[in-house]
Image (cartoon, rainbow, N blue to C red):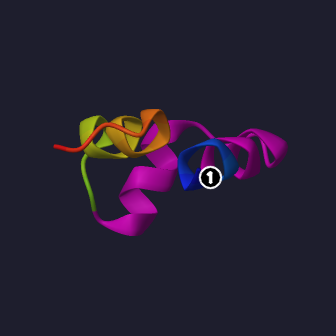
Amino acid sequence: MYFKRIKDLRADHDLPQKRVSEALGISQTKYSALERGVQL
């Protein structure tokens, strides 16, 4: 269950989803789906 781990890592570093998604080069919507384990 990688999605729980990536959410925990982001939260541990106090980073908003928007900032992480920009660093990864994906939309915030796509990143949110990754954290929830939803396939887009």
Residue name at image x 24 percent, y 47 percent: 27
How many numbered marks appear? 1
Residue 6 in picture, x, y percent from top left: 62, 52
Q: In which quarter of the image is the C terminus?
A: top left
Residue name at image x 58 percent, y 36 percent: 16
Residue 37 in picture, x, y percent from top left: 41, 40
Q: Where, by quadrant of the figure, is residue 25 drawn?
A: bottom left
Q: Main SS type for the magenta part?
A: helix
Q: Nearer the viewer, residue 39 or 9?
A: 39
Q: Nearer the viewer, residue 39 or 27?
A: 39
Residue 9 in picture, x, y percent from top left: 74, 52
Amino acid bearing label 1: Ile
Q: Where, by quadrant of the figure, is residue 24 drawn?
A: bottom left
Q: Residue furthest front?
A: 1
Residue name at image x 59 percent, y 50 percent: 1
> On the picture, is 8 further left or further right than 17?
right
33 vs 22: above or below:
above
Q: Which of 12 and 33 is in front in this view?
A: 33
> On the picture, is 24 further left or further right than 39?
right
Is residue 23 shown in magenta? yes
- Residue stretch in magenta: 6-25
